[in-house]
Amino acid sequence: MKLFTPTLLALGLLLCSPGFAQVASQDFDSIMLYTLKNSSGTTVTVTNYGAIITSIVVADRDGNMGDIALGYNSADDYMNAVDKPYFGAVVGRYGNRIAKGKFSINDVEYTLAVNNGENSLHGGIIGFDKVVWDATPVGDNALTLTYLAKDGEEGYPGNLVVSVTYTLTEENELKMHYQATTDATTPVNLTNHTYFNLKGEGEGTILGHELMLNAKKFTPVDEGLIPTGELRDVDGTPFDFTTAKAIGRDIEEENEQLTFGGGYDHNWVLDKEGKEGEMTLAARVKEPTTGRVLEVYTTEPGVQFYCGNFLDGRLKGKAGKPYVHRSGLCLETQHYPDSPNQPNFPSTLLEPGEKYDTTTVFKFSAE
Ligand code: GLA
């Protein structure tokens, strides 16, 4: 497999003229790397392997550019690293867990590929993060990636045509627009699994990042990280991020949910205030030393806040620095985990003739 070399990245950037957002690509067999760029110098690189966002380079409060997304320099690493933490990828057909890899639709039971203890996680063994998508640049600042997931793939029913369009705007927003159609009823839950470190990838932990989550409730889990079905108030618990606080402030508190997650690895129920299905603010993260800020907006009802509890320093990033425990945070906008088995959660079933259509925006700034 060919490398995403620094030269490749440089070439991609050279093809972009200042003042205009542009998309540039280089062909490496069927694995390509695309660069989106806007006039403030923000760049986002994306590969058609797993629809992975491989880098996000943004300014800090002094104008210093830094790459805030964890990942690798080569396609080889994405495919063959000892562990596959879904860096930057689109996960699907069903993001997060489905209990015991089983669910029923109209009394027909389906059995999925199981890859996380007894459960199915992020679409199974070969999820959407491990397949090659078709890529089409759209205009000069966007890229659409398309994939056909065949009926029966990883155990899911229905041929699913899925696409994600990444658009980098002049307002420093990365928009992710997901669409899908199916020919048989199937659960669908798509999200992006970028790990952020607003200090810069490889620059230590995210415990000092200040996080606000627009959510008064979360979905507690069992030992296998499967929701119990309860929507629990965050008030008075370490899960209260309604007012911004450092991620590390309460993370070591004695709390059964923190024990089960090895830290934060839970779904928060977003406060939509009657705006279900509309784009609302889900989260705001600020890194105090650089002043970099990430805001997340979404049409989705939930967000999985995962703080890199499974990172342990074995994987090395783009600058060769180890990704230590909790050195990246994910804000995976989504429907709640295990919805196909939870009658009280919003449905994730897509029917033939319907269109799955969700949007999430990552907005970058510094203050
Ligand atoms: C999600 C899950 C975590 C973990 C990561 C990937 O956030 O909830 O438990 O699987 O993805 O490592």
Image (cartoon, rainbow, N blue to C red):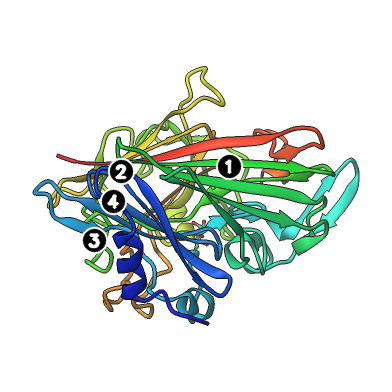
Mark toward the viewer: 3 or 1: 1
Disc 4 and disc 2 in contact, CB within 8 angstroms: yes
Which label's residue is closer to the chain start, 3 or 2? Answer: 2
Q: Residue at x 54, y 33 (%)?
A: 301
From the image, tell me which residue sits under label 4: 17
* Residue type highlighted by circle 1: Tyr
Which label's residue is closer to the chain start, 2 or 1? Answer: 2
From the image, tell me which residue sits under label 2: 20
The circle drawn on residue 178 is 1
From the image, tell me which residue sits under label 3: 200
Q: Badge 2, how many Cα within 10 Å: few under 14, some, many 20+? A: some
Mark toward the viewer: 3 or 4: 4
- Circle 4 sits in a helix, a strand or a loop, which is it? loop
User: Percent position (x, y) of residue 115?
Assistant: 65, 69
Which label's residue is closer to the chain start, 3 or 1? Answer: 1
- Circle 3 sits in a helix, a strand or a loop, which is it? loop
Distance, label 3 to label 1, CA atoms, is: 27 Å
Disc 2 and disc 1 in contact, CB within 8 angstroms: no
- Horizontal side of 151 relative to 344 (left or right) equals right
Q: Residue at x 15, y 46 (%)?
A: 291
Q: Residue furthest left?
A: 62
Q: Residue at x 32, y 72 (%)?
A: 323
- Circle 1 sits in a helix, a strand or a loop, which is it? strand
* Residue type highlighted by circle 3: Gly
Is 66 placed above or below 104 here? below
> Could you tell me if residue 263 is visible in this image?
yes
Q: Badge 3, how many Cα within 10 Å: few under 14, some, many 20+? A: many
Distance, label 4 to label 2, CA atoms, is: 6 Å
Distance, label 3 to label 4, CA atoms, is: 25 Å
Does mark 1's beta carbon lie closer than 8 Å to ligand 1? Answer: no
Q: Badge 4, how many Cα within 10 Å: few under 14, some, many 20+? A: few
